[in-house]
Amino acid sequence: MTSPDRSAALYGLANFPLLDALFGRRSRRFGVGMSIPDGPLAYTSKLPPQPLSEFERAVLIAVGIGISGWNLGIPHTEVGEPDTGCNYTVRPIGRTFPSGAATHGSEILINDDSGAYITRFRDLDASAIQEYGGVDDLARLAEWLQPHMIQLSDRRIEFPPEYPYVASHNRWVANKPGSTLIIPISDQVESTFNQLWIRTGEGAVVTDPKSGRVLGDPAELIDAGVLRRDRSVPLSVIEGNSRTSTTAELSIAAYNVHLVMQAMGLGGWLFSGINTQAILGAFAPKGVDGFGFRFDRRDDWVQPNPVGLDGLFEPLIPPYVPDMHVAAQRFAERKFGPRGNHNPQRPGPYLDNGGVKSRTDTYSPAFVRYLGTLAQDIYDTYGKFPGTQPSVGVAAYTQAHHIDLGFYDTHYKEGAYLQTHADHQRIWHADETTADK
């Protein structure tokens, strides 16, 4: 697209009413190049598959799941030393979707005709954060994020359209040529660490849900009055809360993308019909490589555990750290180290940035030591961390594609798609339609 054409498309996107996106949101599954072979809605597209342009994809990601500025922190907690600030938040960034205690440890997997990608947004330097200042910033934000999308493959990752890889009602449509899969993933390790940090600050010891055994070595913190013998929480409750939080985070990210698709005039829907284990790569021994994540396997596990993607998405668990004691130390450094969120020398959203951060409640070495013993005990007991949840999480995700208006005109009443869908080719592909004339 030429610059004027981009401006028109972005202006329309920026001025699309939120209520129109909410009330006009539908799962518009039928895209150009697709076919429904039989049944009352049988139809074969008369148009070839049309992949999203690189610019369309970049805008969809920047608006739906990109960086939006600083998060504003958690203003107060009763836990910790009097007259100190809350230390729960992990990262300084704000994104277009929320994250529990601003952990923001998620990234995005992308799969389309040009290949497979993973974003590297979560550890962008705080000093480089770009604030959104209006429609004129959209193209700049999309361009700024583009180098942080790392290509994993130069071809689409395929999933066999059969059991157990793709649900039967999705086989005709999921991951077809021309489509773009946008799959948020969570660092369940980091989220669990933060949940354990918060519960420890509230004085609760952690117990094994089956045996009732106290996990880790809390003696030092009990003697110091930080932990209380009369407060305990089963590990499965803490890890369940963590998974609930990250599932919401990932699902909202996917839903954001779906809403932006309405404003851009793209088809697609939010779903979970591709086996998440297959997406990450658990079936690689059977020739279905997925995105190539490392997995650990044990006979007493229901499913293998996704550990990480070497060099690109590495949670604080072995083999990416020597042990969980080191993991606890590195997690504390993410908050308070030289580049940590709460370091007074680092930039942030406050008028008195250094003053606010210098008064944030810090962790004692004893606190970090205890978290190391707790995390190591969990890892040794369950063979993984978290003990009762996968180390890398996937929830719902979104597929985007160019809608086939002919299918909806043939089978549906007027109103099955928005004006943005009717105008999409003219506005977002004006240079292509002009070149064809």
Image (cartoon, rainbow, N blue to C red):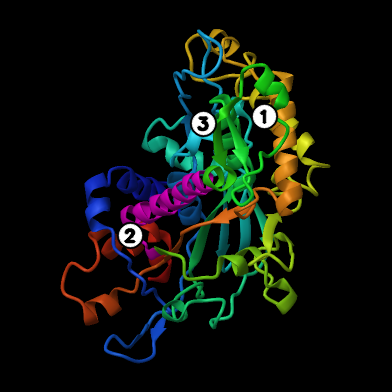
Q: Which numbered disc covers residue 130?
A: 3
Residue 38 falls inside the magenta stretch: no
96 or 395: nearer the eye? 395
Q: In the image, which is nearer the foreground, mark 1 or mark 2?
A: 1
What residue appears at the point 52 percent right and 48 percent down from the top-left corner?
A: 240
Residue at the spot of label 2 = 265
User: Which comes sooner in the sequence, label 1 or label 2?
Assistant: 2
What residue appears at the point 39 percent right and 53 percent down from the top-left corner?
A: 255
- Which SS class for mark 2? loop
| Badge 1 amino acid | Arg
User: Which comes sooner in the sequence, label 3 or label 2?
Assistant: 3
Residue at the spot of label 1 = 334
Q: How many angstroms separate mark 3 from mark 2 (CA)?
A: 26 Å
Q: In the image, which is nearer the foreground, mark 3 or mark 1?
A: 1
429 or 285: nearer the eye? 285
User: Which comes sooner in the sequence, label 3 or label 1?
Assistant: 3
Q: How many angstroms separate mark 1 from mark 2 (CA)?
A: 40 Å
Q: How many angstroms separate mark 3 from mark 1 (CA)?
A: 21 Å
| Badge 2 amino acid | Gly
Residue extent of the magenta highlight: 240-269
Structural crowding at the residue carrying mark 1, measured as other residues with C-alpha within 10 Å and reported as few (<14), some (14–19) or many (≥20): some
- For the C terminus, give its image quadrant: bottom left
Q: Is residue 337 visible?
A: no
Q: Position of residue 248 (x, y in %)?
A: 44, 48
Q: Which numbered disc covers residue 57?
A: none
- For the N terminus, give its image quadrant: bottom left
Q: Position of residue 366 (x, y in %)?
A: 73, 21
